[in-house]
Image (cartoon, rainbow, N blue to C red):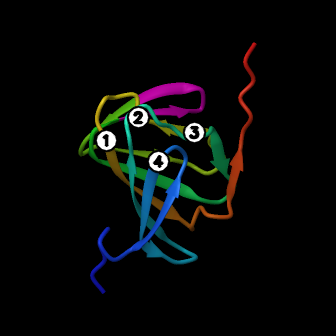
Amino acid sequence: MITSTQNAEHYTWGNQCDGWHLLKSNTLSVIQERMPPGTGEQLHYHHNAQQVFYILSGTATFEVGGESKTVQANESIHIAPNTKHRILNNSDADLHFLVISEPKSHGDRVNVDVVTL
């Protein structure tokens, strides 16, 4: 089956962010996502899932293990299980990326409260 954002299961998350399930199985998940400028997700980790984020267009800022990392279009970043992370779009253009999770990350996410001193 050929899958695209035109026929994939769609969902929204965060502040006007979009996701499309290109592959949705218990052992592997491939999602295409879009984040508008100035959006981000909550810091979190996954007990079991490892993830690869591949940036299709735009510039992503990742917080990974307390460090900031910039990932450009045509680059990827691997997130190991139990690693606190989040993705942010600090740019003025939409961010488009793939997130590949093995096994699936849905149901395996633990949000982390950020404490400001």
Which residue is rendered at x = 75% and y = 23% of the image? 115
Mark on residue 85?
3
Q: Are marks 2 and 3 in contact (CB under 8 Å)?
A: no
Quadrant location, the C terminus: top right
Q: Earlier in the sequence, mark 1 or mark 2?
A: 2
Task: Characterize the local packing of mark 1: few (<14), some (14-19) or many (20 or more) Cα atoms within 10 angstroms.
Answer: some
Q: Mark 4 — residue? A: 16
Mark on residue 89?
2
Q: Earlier in the sequence, mark 4 or mark 3?
A: 4
Q: Earlier in the sequence, mark 2 or mark 4?
A: 4
Which residue is rendered at x = 68% and y = 64% of the image? 107
**Residue lying furthest bottom in this view?**
1
Which residue is rendered at x = 55% and y = 41% of the image? 41
**Disc 3 versus disc 1: distance between alpha carbons?**
20 Å
Quadrant location, the N terminus: bottom left
* Secondary structure mostly seen in the magenta stretch: strand
Q: Which amino acid type corresponds to the residue marked 1 in the rendered image?
A: Asp
Q: Which amino acid type corresponds to the residue marked 2 in the rendered image?
A: Asn
Task: Characterize the local packing of mark 4: few (<14), some (14-19) or many (20 or more) Cα atoms within 10 angstroms.
Answer: few
Q: Earlier in the sequence, mark 4 or mark 1?
A: 4
